[in-house]
Image: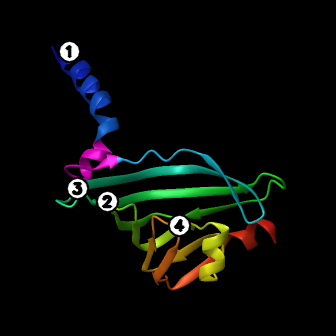
Amino acid sequence: MPRRLLVLSLLTLLLLAPASTAWARGDGWEPLNNQPFTVEACGTTVDATFPMDKEYQQVTTDAEGNQHIKVTGALKVTLTDSATGRSVTYNISGPGTSIAYANGDFLFNATGRNLLFLTPEQAAATGLPQLFVTSGPISVLFRADGSVEVQRLGNHLQDICAALTG
């Protein structure tokens, strides 16, 4: 009998352990599962990987069809210049609350440390680098037409283009 109880206890632990982190976040929180990707930025090809990805999101849709997205957890990104192999790693854990509007606009709101990517045109229009990490409150509206409006910029900005290519 004690052996059966031990086996059942271990089986229960093995089955519940992977889900325990998500359950600890409460109802509606789902893992984000960030995937590696490549982007042309800063005059080079940049590979992005996630050595730590424990980020979760909760998405709700309002009556107008806008999606309200809450993101929290722990996330680190490594960005590598594929031509030189030079890389940098940042903690970009946020958290954030953003809105994907039904008209195609996207409002990015966050605090903490966050990574942003801009097109060359958006970078030129705002005077910001194409890739940067901010600390502190930030609010950026990405319009469906491709334009961008910086409503609030964090307390500290790190130019990733300079870090990778400098």
- Measured as percent of width and height from the top left, residue 6 is found at 24, 22
Three-letter amino acid code at the position of disc 4: Gly
Is there a contact, CB below 8 Å, between mark 2 and mark 3? no
Three-letter amino acid code at the position of disc 1: Arg
Q: Which residues are magenta?
A: 20-30
The residue that disc 1 covers is 4
Residue positioned most to the right: 84
Residue 59 among magenta residues: no
Measured along the vertical axis of the image, is residue 147 above or below residue 28?
A: below
Q: Which quadrant does the N terminus fall into?
A: top left
In this rendered view, identify the residue nearer to me: 86 or 15.
86
User: Label for residue 61?
Assistant: 3
Label 4 to label 1, Cα distance in Å?
62 Å
Label 1 to label 3, Cα distance in Å?
47 Å
User: Label for residue 102?
Assistant: 2
Label 2 to label 3, Cα distance in Å?
10 Å
User: Label for residue 20?
Assistant: none
Q: Which quadrant does the C terminus fall into?
A: bottom right
Label 2 to label 1, Cα distance in Å?
55 Å
The residue that disc 4 covers is 146
In this rendering, which labeled residue sits more in front, label 4 or label 1? 4
Three-letter amino acid code at the position of disc 3: Thr
For the point 57% across and 71% down, the residue is: 133
For the point 37% across and 67% down, the residue is: 96
Label 4 to label 3, Cα distance in Å?
23 Å
The quarter of the displayed image where residue 41 is located = bottom right
Looking at the image, is mark 2 or mark 3 earlier in the sequence? 3
